[in-house]
Image: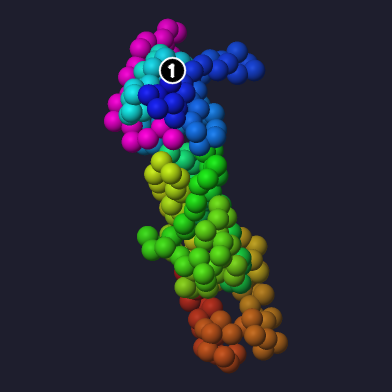
Amino acid sequence: VSGDGSALGGISTTAEGVQRAIVWTRAGSTVDLSAYMASLGVDLDGWTLVSCHAISADGSAVAGEAIKDGVPFAVGFVITGIESLCLPMIVEEPAGVTVCRGGEVALSVGVAYDAGVTYQWRRGGLAIDVAEVPSAGTATLVLGVVGMDEVGTYDVVVSSACGSVVSAGAEVARCDADFDCSGFVDIEDYTAFTLAFEEGGEQADFDGSGFVDVDDFAAFAVAFEAGC
């Protein structure tokens, strides 16, 4: 136990009989200590922490036993320089996605220590205004239909009373050449656009000029040749 009682370390055994070191904090969750250290940026390099015997008074160091891949016996370990053992733990990073023209996107993050945490989604490192996009303050950012203004790299800052962690970046891209939204750019997209163009529908306004004309066909042809 840490000096202020904010973190507890110990041992757990899985249903398969595999021993793992665990940690519990006031944030309200018990998690695998190896996974938690990895979430804090600690490179374990093939080591698995199998027991936690001590936590320093300030929570900046932990000690216990670990096993290296391929080695049948455990050895002692000490990890120092930990910022905080009760930081939120990201267990599921937001995933990048490429959508077709008119496609909708929602990005999510999974957090183990989720009691009392707050979220702030960012695009290109800049915070998204929660007043304009309320979901930017939740675990799931809903972008809706992705326009060119929404294309970019997104991440989320997860904060608690202990501090903040930042997720990995998720790239949101748009593939206009995937006209039929099949997930592939092929001759069927060319056929679908040609039909829409002949009908003169709004969907065929590929260049966004407000008119359906030969410039739209030229713009689509360029996008089709470029692929995604």
Three-letter residue code for mark 1: Cys
Magenta residues (range): 69-86
Place of residue 141 in the rendered image (x, y in percent of width and height, measured from the top left): 55, 59
Q: In the rendered structure, does residue 83 fall within the stretch colored magenta? A: yes
Name the residue at 46% across, 21% down: 9
Outermost residue, front direction? Answer: 4
Outermost residue, left direction? Answer: 81
Q: Residues within 10 Å of mark 1 (few under 14, many from 20)?
A: many
> Is residue 207 shown left or right of residue 193?
left
Residue bearing the label numbered 1: 52
Outermost residue, top direction? Answer: 73
Element type at marker 1? strand
Place of residue 121 in the rendered image (x, y in percent of width and height, measured from the top left): 47, 58
Judging depth in this view, the residue of 59 and 95 nearest the camera is 59
Q: Quadrant of the N terminus?
A: top left
Q: Is residue 163 above or below residue 37?
A: below
Please, which colouring scheme is shown? rainbow
Place of residue 167 in the rendered image (x, y in percent of width and height, measured from the top left): 44, 48
Name the residue at 64% across, 81% down: 203
Magenta span: predominant SS is loop
> Is residue 103 shown left or right of residue 161?
right
Q: Is residue 182 above or below residue 112?
A: below
